[in-house]
Image (cartoon, grey):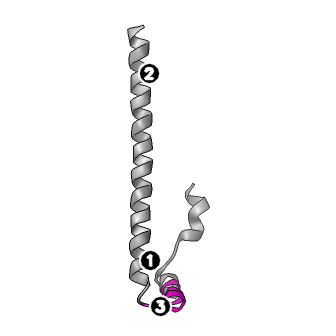
């Protein structure tokens, strides 16, 4: 799987170029707002994914209990 993501191997020069492009596109006043919303989105995504994993674990545990009772 790591081989599929090799194009994401960004170094310092690449990150600086991306930052300059973002500054040119959005301006300095919008970048903190954009980064804040991006951080909140990632946080919600992680919460949703971990919630789904917890729900599936609970469902499999309840199915196991039903099987052991029968």
* Mark sitting on residue 63: 2
**Majority secondary structure of the magenta segment?**
helix
Give, as a single range, the part of the protein colored magenta. Answer: 18-28
Indicate whether residue 25 is drawn in magenta: yes
Dot in front, 1 or 2: 1
- Identify whether 67 is placed above or below 38: above
Q: Is residue 23 magenta?
A: yes
Task: Give the quarter of the figure containing the C terminus.
Answer: top left
Percent of width and height locating residue 18? 52, 83
Residue underneath mark 3: 27
Q: Position of residue 58 (x, y in %)?
A: 39, 31
Pick whichever, 6 or 38, lies toward us: 38
Q: Split into 4 quadrants, where in the image is the N terminus?
A: bottom right
Would you place residue 70 above or below residue 58 in this image? Answer: above
Disc with the residue nearer the chain's start (3 vs 2)? 3
Q: Are marks 3 and 1 in contact (CB under 8 Å)?
A: no
Which residue corresponds to the image point at 42% horizontal and 71% vertical from the top-left? 37
Going from N to C along the chain, the mark reached first, 3 or 1, is: 3
Quick check: 51 above or below 27? above
**Res 45 quadrant in image:** bottom left
Along the horizontal axis of the image, is 48 left or right of 5?
left
Q: Secondary structure at mark 1?
A: helix
State the mark number for residue 34.
1
Q: Nearer the viewer, residue 11 or 45?
A: 45
Q: Residue at x 57, y 63 (%)?
A: 5
- Discs 1, 2 touching: Cβ within 8 Å: no
- Residue pictured at 44% horizontal, 27% vertical: 60
Q: CA distance from mark 3 to mark 2?
A: 54 Å
Please tell me how crowded label 1 is: few (under 14), some (14-19), or many (20+) other residues with Cα within 10 Å.
Answer: few
């Amino acid at each position: 799987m790591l081989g599929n993501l090799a194009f994401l191997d960004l170094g310092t020069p690449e990150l600086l170029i991306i930052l300059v492009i973002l500054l040119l596109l959005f301006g300095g006043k919008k970048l903190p707002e954009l980064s804040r919303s991006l951080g909140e989105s990632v946080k919600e995504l992680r919460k949703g994914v971990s919630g789904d994993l917890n729900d599936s674990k609970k469902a499999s545990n309840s199915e196991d209990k039903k099987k052991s009772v029968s």
